[in-house]
Amino acid sequence: MGKVLTDTEVSRYRDEGFLCPIPLFGAAEARAIRAKIEAIEAKTGDEAQNRFRIKAHLPFPWLGALICHERLLDAVEDIIGPDILCWGSSFFSKNARDPRYVSWHQDTTYYGLKPRDTLTAWVALTDANTQNGCMKMIPGSHRSGEQAVHEETFDSNNLLTRGQTIKGIDETKAVDVVLKAGEFSFHSELTYHSSPPNQSDDRRIGYSIHYIAPHVRQTLFPGATAMVCRGRDTYGHWLTEPAPREDFDPVCMAALDAAYAQYKAASQKATAA
């Protein structure tokens, strides 16, 4: 028995490549975080998912606190062990009646991590259901340990940067990842997943957090950074990230932009090769 997850739940994650739903906090706390996100969007004049990529937590102390939420880390520890690093986080939002979607893909396509052991926690800050475009997973699609062939479509309605898509998915096998605001799901970076457009009258907002054990390393470029959330970095593969002193901390904003430029250049180089 783990700190949060049962042995059965851990086994289900390892067998199916995802797990849901897992309670984190109540709807009121989810609404408070949503309000902060929308205040940021009002200030910047852009969606948070556009301005704050790859390491959205860096410039905001309250997002750093969310990444290090004790219950969340307890659940992560049940999967990957007591030494926990966070190398990235991103928003995935769809507006009311939004045609945008996420195609079938594996997160691992442009991560460049070895081994491919990222555990992503997707935190629902609004309800996520079949009407507003919740995620869908293909159980067991991670088991080969390999990256599937992806076609880059660059569809303007695809929320993925390059529109990377796995063709020929048998969608009859897909499972809906239905979450209430304040719940989260886990999935492996190798698990096939997608999400359809939002057909509801409210936004769907999720926040994905990428956790690894310290033996995982970045192979696409040198100088990658991560936050030690619990335990110790026992391997030293990752440089230390700056900690924000306030929202929009300028040092952290510069670090975020530099990290995004690294990942963007690396993904383009990998594609060209």
Image: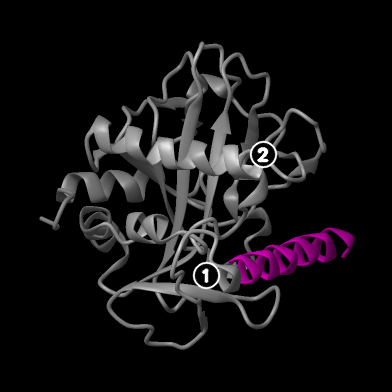
Q: Is residue 86 left or right of residue 110?
A: left
| Mark 1 burial class by Cα count in 10 Å: few <14, some 14-19, many 20+ | few
Q: Secondary structure at mark 1?
A: loop
Q: Residue at x 42, y 36 (%)?
A: 34
Residue at the spot of label 2: 45
Q: Position of residue 31 (x, y in %)?
A: 34, 32
Q: Position of residue 226 (x, y in %)?
A: 49, 73
Query: Which of pointers 2 and 1 lies earlier in the amino acid sequence?
Result: 2
At label 2, which amino acid type do we have?
Gly
- Residue 32 falls in image quadrant: top left
Nearest-to-viewer mark from 2 and 1? 2
Which residues are the magenta region? Answer: 253-273
For the residues labelled 2 and 1, say whether their Cβ atoms are less than 8 Å apart: no
**2 or 171: which is nearer to us?**
2
**84 or 205: which is nearer to us?**
205
Measured Cα–Cα span from mark 2 to mark 1: 38 Å
Label annotation for residue 115: 1
Q: Residue at x 63, y 54 (%)?
A: 147
Q: Residue at x 25, y 32 (%)?
A: 28
